[in-house]
Amino acid sequence: MAKKASFTLFVLLTYLLVSSCAGAFAESRVHVHFFVVPAVAKDGKNLSEELAKLRQELISLAGGYTELGPSRGGSTGPNGVVTAEDNYSFVVAAPKNITAELEKYIPEHFATEHPFVLVWEANSSLPAGS
């Protein structure tokens, strides 16, 4: 009986050790932001320079970014006419929701009044900002 109790205690302690170690490598909760910026900088500014500033801002806000590159999107305007626009698409995982910061930054540097930003919570294999 003592051997069975010792073995049960050993299994329990091993389980607790393994599960606590697994927690150290658990997924991290992040806010994923997909957004586009127009392929036109505001007020005739240099697009390449504005994209470089945006990349630096994303590193400052979230620790990094993924630039998906040139894209094209369309929408129906108030008059019912579909318009298409050339854009640059980005994905950013951040430890917090940075939509407000993006909605402020993008119109200050790119030719849009209302930026398109999608955000959702997700699990990441790396901590946000790393």
Image (tube, helix red, strand yellow):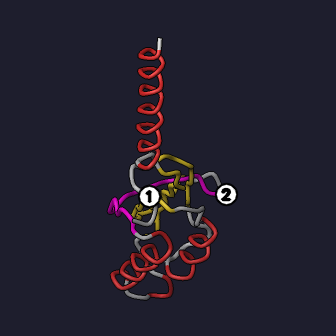
Camera-side residue of 61 and 54 = 61
Residue at (50%, 87%) from the top-left corner? 43
- The residue type indicated by label 1 comes to Pro
Disc 2 crowd rating (10 Å Cα; few below 14, some 14-19, many 20+) is: few
The answer to whether residue 49 is above or below residue 114 is below
Please identify the dominant SS of the magenta region.
Answer: strand
Per the image, label 2 sits on a secondary structure element best described as: loop
Q: CA distance from mark 2 to mark 1?
A: 41 Å
Q: Residue 102 placed where, x, y %?
A: 56, 70
Is residue 69 in the magenta section?
yes
Q: Is residue 103 left or right of residue 44?
A: right
Quarter holding the C terminus is bottom left
- The part of the chain drawn in magenta is 64-78
* Amino acid type, mark 2: Pro
Q: Are marks 2 and 1 in contact (CB under 8 Å)?
A: no
Q: Nearer the viewer, residue 70 or 117?
A: 117
- Nearest the camera: 46 or 3? 3
Q: Is residue 110 left or right of residue 53?
A: right
Quadrant for residue 100, please give it: bottom right
| Residue pointed to by mark 2 | 78
Which residue is drawn at the image coordinates 66% and 56% (left, top)?
A: 79
Q: What residue lies at 45% left-to-right and 61% top-to-bottom?
A: 92
Q: Which mark is residue 127?
A: 1
Relative to 79, is 35 on the left or the right?
left
Q: Is residue 3 left or right of residue 79?
A: left
